[in-house]
């Protein structure tokens, strides 16, 4: 398993991602600016993180959220929905997801 160490630049907050879901297909949408800032501060290739053979942006966001919450950060409703969907998929053997906004 690959391990990444990232630096969250001063002034960049989890909320800056502005996570949302596309109501038509449920895809997660987010601002690229905070991801680009993290990649720059961490000397990571943005293209590899977002569009590489094994895109790591989802894992980066999930790890950042865990750190955000453990540091007392406010819950993000979209990320909480994603975590609940993941929990239910694991619990029910995969292939389970709520319609966007209904987890």
Image: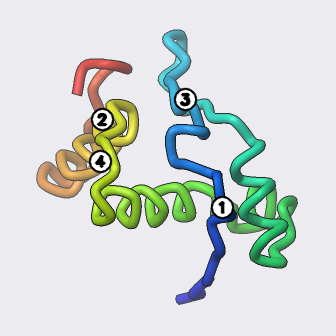
The structure residue drawn at horizontal position 62% and vertical position 82%, both measured from the top left corner, is 4
**The furthest residue to the left:** 91
The structure residue drawn at horizontal position 55% and vertical position 18%, both measured from the top left corner, is 22
The one of 19 and 99 positioned closer to us in this rendering: 19
Proximity of marks 4 and 3: CB atoms separated by less than 8 Å: no
Q: Which residue is mark 4?
A: 83
Query: Which one is earlier in the sequence, the residue at label 4 or at label 3?
Result: 3
On screen, residue 101 above or below 10: above
On screen, residue 78 above or below 46: above
Q: CA distance from mark 2 to mark 1?
A: 27 Å
Q: Which residue is mark 2?
A: 81
Q: Quadrant of residue 45?
A: bottom right
Rate crowding at label 3 as few (under 14), some (14 to 19) or many (20 or more) other CA atoms within 10 Å.
few
Tag shown at residue 39 = none
Secondary structure type for disc 1: loop
Tag shown at residue 10 = 1
Task: Give x and y (percent) for residue 18.
Answer: 56, 31
Query: Which one is earlier in the sequence, the residue at label 2 or at label 3?
Result: 3
Query: Which one is earlier in the sequence, the residue at label 1 or at label 3?
Result: 1
Left or right, 93 with respect to 28, comes to left
Q: Which residue is mark 3?
A: 27
Q: CA distance from mark 4 to mark 1?
A: 26 Å
Q: CA distance from mark 1 to mark 3?
A: 29 Å
Q: Quadrant of residue 55?
A: bottom right
Secondary structure type for disc 4: helix
Proximity of marks 2 and 1: CB atoms separated by less than 8 Å: no
On screen, residue 56 above or below 19: below
Left or right, 73 with respect to 36, comes to left
Proximity of marks 4 and 2: CB atoms separated by less than 8 Å: yes
Secondary structure type for disc 2: helix
């Amino acid at each position: 398993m690959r391990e990444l160490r990232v630096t969250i630049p001063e002034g960049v907050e989890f909320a800056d991602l502005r996570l949302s879901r596309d109501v038509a297909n449920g895809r997660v949408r987010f601002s690229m600016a905070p991801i680009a800032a993290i990649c720059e501060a961490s000397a990571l290739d943005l293209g590899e993180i977002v569009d590489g053979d094994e895109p790591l942006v989802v894992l980066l966001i999930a790890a950042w959220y865990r750190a955000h919450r453990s540091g007392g950060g406010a819950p993000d409703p979209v990320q909480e929905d994603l975590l609940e969907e993941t929990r239910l998929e694991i619990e029910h053997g995969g292939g389970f997801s709520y319609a966007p906004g209904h987890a």
